[in-house]
Amino acid sequence: MASTPGSDGKSKVPVPAHFSCPVSMELMVDPVMVVTGHTYDRPFIQRWLESGNKTCPVTGIKLRSLELTPNFALRMAIQDWATANGIVLNTSSLTSVMEKAVVNTAGEGEEGAAGGCSSVPHSVIEGHDEIVWAVEATARHLFSASADKTIRVWDTTTRRCLHVLEEHTRPVLSLAVSERHAKLFSGSYDCSIRVWDLNTYRRVKSLHGHTDAVRALAVCGDVLFSGSYDSTVRAFDINTLKPLKVLEGHTEPVRTLAVLAGKLFSGSYDKTVRVWDTVSLESLAVLEGHTDAVRALTASPVEECNYVFSGSDDATVRVWDANSFNCVAVFDGHADNVRVLTADSKHLYSGSWDKTIRVWDMRTLQCVKVLEGHVEAVLALTVMRSHLISGSYDTTVRFWNTESFTCVGKFEGHEDAVRVLTSTGEDAETVYSGSYDGSIGFWSTPVPATGAPNAAPAPAASATASLSDAMSSLNVGGPPAAAS
């Protein structure tokens, strides 16, 4: 029977067998159940799964799902027992919602996948009841918008949901944050924009005027811009929250917005990109050339590369000079719709329905690499610390090193398509994902397991030994013991 130090720090208190983790043989603090019904302490079962094991440690049965469900009844019983015996538990990081285990399967028989990497903690947490359509992040908070009509506010350190904002009457499709104004904006199928105070998380005002879904939001200076399926763009004063102007010209739904050098670019299903002055709110140009709907826009973050990029259902990416409005290049190569674009200081990345990601040099405007690995459409892209992160209909999140262009992490955790990704920029330490299954993913950079300069610190020797011994006793690495 396991034992733990009593209140005097010396005497050992025997731990009831059902309070002990079958892997660590120690008192559980955060008991969670796998789908077989067996309960384990969360840090140990997560480490077991992240090591590549996909079986229940006790039974050896393959897990049909990697979900970890908090065992609240057992947790409460353990806490009551600990209190009665003068034992102090560290409960600072207890799970508050269902959390799914995450497995890095990079290198499992994949050509070009970089093996030998261990992962720093990741998690996929259930929160929304339906598709997550948008995610936005600040240094301290993540905001997620869903078809369940809500916006959730997450603490990025504890990964706990702090607030659920419920006022929209139909799915929430778009988000924008202005930290300078301490405001969050949400656009919905209910044709409205809700304005939320970032300090109190109370609704400040509802902005109306659109006659169809608000699909895109962008902030420039003191102006909020909204793009809608009603084919218009509207401008609102962020300080007064009063409407400024309706920007008309598109003939089909406005799908995407981007801001660069005092100009707003709007992409539409009418196959055009329109340019607007963000101060005068006058139309500056209509950029034509695409032969199908424009679904994605992104602006170069590099000052000397004054480009806006547009991705279309015509399978091309067009490069527009933000000053002259001329098309300076057309990127061909994708075999299907270009669904998503993102950029860092060196490259533009385009994700397509053809299951690939193409890498384009920001300065030479040439394709330098085609990233293959996803087995379904690429729906989401973002960047962080020398990595590109991609999300796909195949339910995985992949990490690509932007120096070698190798896949250094393939993570399974979401149970449906990864619809959206976000980070706080190229220097971000964490990336966030939203899925069709309503879950939210928190991801950190995979690091080499051996003594690389940026390798994560190894676990404490005692913890490692404990896990190793427990795995050995459970016959890890070999077939499960035959039933008697």
Image: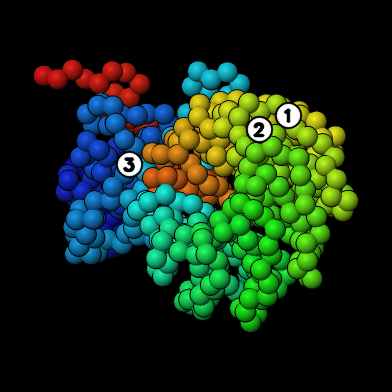
User: Residue at (31%, 44%) from the top-left corner?
Assistant: 68
Residue type at mark 2 is Ala
* Distance from Cα at disc 2 to Cα at disc 3: 37 Å
What kind of residue is marked 1? Asp
Asked if the residues shown at circle 1 and circle 3 are in contact, with their CB atoms under 8 angstroms apart, the answer is: no
- Tell me if label 1 and label 2 are in contact, CB under 8 Å: yes
Disc 2 target residue? 315
Q: Is residue 288 visible?
A: yes
Colour scheme employed for the rendering of this structure: rainbow
Q: Disc 1 or disc 3, which is closer to the eye?
A: 1
Judge whether 202 appears above or below 272 on screen.
below
Q: SS class of the residue under badge 2? A: loop
Q: Are marks 2 and 3 in contact (CB under 8 Å)?
A: no
* Horizontal arrangement in the rendering, residue 339 relative to residue 411 (left or right): right
**Percent x, y for residue 435?**
45, 45
Q: Label 1 belongs to which residue?
A: 332
Left or right: 372, with 144 as reference point: right
x then y, percent, for residue 204? 51, 79
Q: To which residue does mark 3 refer?
A: 67
Q: Amino acid at mark 3?
A: Glu
**Tag 3's secondary structure?**
strand
Residue 26 in the image, given as x and y percentages of width and height = 28, 45
Lower position in the chain sequence, tag 1 or tag 3: 3
As rendered, which of 166 and 458 lies closer to the eye? 166
* Residue in the image at 61% along x and 51% along y: 252
Q: Whole-percent x and y of residue 176?
A: 59, 63
